[in-house]
Structure formats: structure tokens, C-alpha cells
Image: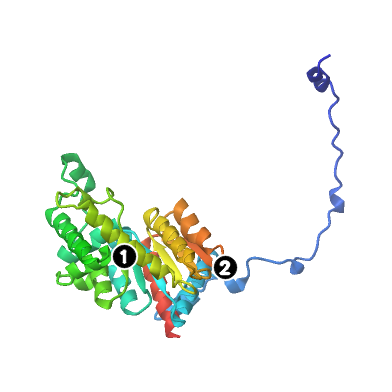
Amino acid sequence: MSACDATLSSPPMKTPALDFSKIRTYPVGERCNKVVLESFAKPHKLGSSFSTFLENLPAFLAVDDLRSIVRDLAEARSNGRPVVLMMGAHPIKVGLNPIIIDSLRSGIVTAVALNGAGAIHDFELCFQGETSEDVQRGLNDGSFGMAEETGYMMNQAFREGAKAGKGAGEALGAAMTNFPNHHLSILATAYELKIPVTVHIAIGTDIIHQHPHCDGAALGACSYSDFQLFAAVLAQLEGGAVLNVGSAVILPEVFLKALTIARNLGNRVEKFTTATFDMTRHYRPTENVQRRPTALGGKGYYLIGHHEINIPLIFAAVKEALAK
């Protein structure tokens, strides 16, 4: 008889009944509970303040995270520590420039890092008050990204900036100061306020790289200067905070490398807060912003939601906290 046959011929296991009458219980009052009435939301009352609205939110999950982020940002600025905003293009495309600019002028944000797309949309809004073309239509007829002024002027700014040893952010900000909507430009405002603003370019990802005036050497020189500047900003991050808004790949990768350089050169950058705001969770922001950089004693958060709601909310809450 084979081993298999022997197994199949074994008698079935017996399952004796359990005596449920002997189950032990204890008073509910002795139990540690996660939900208590004091944590519930309170209804909004007409005419009440924004600060009251925040206080009336329920003390659970994302609200707890939001309150922690607000507290850390306010504490960082109260202690003179930096708050760095890393941002993709989408927050600009949903109308948040006035909120970002107010955060620069009010001293909440002390440095800005953009990807190439963010710089392009900020540039076009500053130049003509409009941006964001119909990609499908332009792709179909070969005209996508071929706007003359955007491609020529931005690439010219990079050429001149490279010759002068400027970074991409400074070069663009300087070129935009006389544009009609410079007061609504992140790049122009940062340049005016002498706030570090960096642009991190991945060649081939942006429409201006298609332009006949594009100079790869100038792009590389300007963006590399900004990478060095960004590393210098992060060298002072201890006790501060980094916000990543709508960048799933470029800025989380740049952040990790620049932070490594800051630490490699002997700067203590361990205890700081990071927070990513996006409409869905992505791998790189989770690992390269929320988890890995904060492993030495920092705190990392990830708030899911629409930028046009969460970003005005977070900056308004920080302003309220700083005013107390």
C-alpha cells in the first residue's frame, strides 16, 4: 500500500463540541474603546469662525493627521525652521496659485521646488492668464506642445540663466517679473521675495523640450544648479517640514537624493515632518517622502483628497494656528 493510500484510508478526525456556557465575559466599562462621544463632530453654526469649524471636526483618522500636520507646520515656523513645498503641475491647474503665493508672502512656506510641468503652467499663466491645452487634439494633428512663445521664452531664459550661472527657478523668475500676471506667479513671487525656488527638469518630459530653440546643455546646467540649491535647503531642514503636493515621481526621487547629500556632508537632518497631499496613494511618495526620510525620528503623513480642497484647508488652518 502506498503512503497516499494509507493517508486516504485514515479515519476522520473527531471534533468535540465546545461548551459555550463557559465563555468568560467582563463588564463593558472595563474595556478600552477607540470611539468616544467626545471625539464626535459638532454641527456647524451659521456665522461661526473657520477656527471653530476646525475644532468641530471629528477627532478621527485623516482629521487627526491634518491636525498633527498643522501643529508641526506652525511649530516649525514659530521656531524659525523651514517649510519646503514640493509641487507638481496639478495644483496650479486647479487654481491654487493665490493660496501658494499667500503662503510665501505670509512666511509659511520658505522654499519651493517644482517639476518642469509646474514651471510651464506657472509661466503661461503669468504670461497670458491661460494654460493647459487640449492634449488629445494637439496629439492628433502634431501640434501638442508646439506653442511658440512658451517654448522660445522659457528656453531663452534657461540659455541666459546658464550663462550667468543661475538655476532654472531664478532664471525663469527673473524673466517673468514684467509679465502681466506676475503677481499670481509662484516663480515670479519667489524671485521677488528672494525665496529659493527650484525647478527639477527631466529632459523629454515637458513640451518645451520639443521646441527648436531648446538647448539640452542649458537645461541640464540650470536644473543641476537647482539640485545643488535644493540640497542646501534640505541641509537646514532639521525641525522643519516638507510638503509634497501632487508629484508622484520626480520630486520624491529628487528629495531622496538631495536629502542623502545633505546628510552625507555632515548635516544633522533627522527630526522633521513630511506630508504628501494627493488624490491617490503612490509608491514613491509613500517610500521616498513619508517613510524612508523620516526613519531617524521624523514624522510622515499622507492625506488623500483633491488638491483644490485640501491645500486651501491646510494653509488656512496653519494661519489660524500661527495667529493664536
The image quadrant that residue 116 belongs to is bottom left
Residue 163 badge? none
Q: Is residue 244 left or right of residue 122?
A: right
Residue at 31 percent of width and 65 percent of height: 198
Q: Position of residue 313 (x, y in %)?
A: 40, 70
User: At numbered mark 1, what does the secondary structure look like: helix, strand or loop?
Assistant: strand
Q: Which residue is mark 1?
A: 198
Q: Residue at x 27, y 55 (%)?
A: 220
Instruction: Please state, as top left, top right, bottom left or bottom right, where the N terminus lies in the image.
Output: top right
Q: In the rendered structure, which disc, 1 or 2, sits on the residue that comes first in sequence?
A: 1
Identify the residue position indicated by label 2 in the image: 297
Where disc 2 sits, the SS reads loop
Q: Is residue 139 above or below residue 109?
A: above
What's the colour scheme? rainbow
Q: In this orientation, which residue lies closer to the viewer: 287 or 92?
A: 287
165 is higher (above) or lower (below) than 13 = below
Q: Residue furthest left?
A: 148
Task: Say if 86 sits above or below 75 in the image.
Answer: above
User: Marks 1/2: CA distance?
Assistant: 27 Å
Which x, y percent locates residue 13?
84, 31
Along the horizontal axis of the image, is 297 left or right of 181? right
Amino acid carrying mark 2 in the image:
Gly
Horizontal relation, residue 88 to residue 32: left or right:
left
Give residue 79's position: percent from left, percent from top. Answer: 47, 82
Please say whether residue 293 is visible from this viewpoint: yes
Q: Nearer the viewer, residue 71 or 151?
A: 151
Residue type at the position of mark 1:
Thr
* Tally of numbered tags: 2
What residue sits 81% from the left and 59% below the top?
Answer: 25
Label 1, residues with CA under 10 Å away: few <14, some 14-19, many ≥20: many
- Towards the viewer: 271 or 17: 271
Q: Do the CB atoms of the residues marked 1 and 2 lie less than 8 Å apart?
A: no
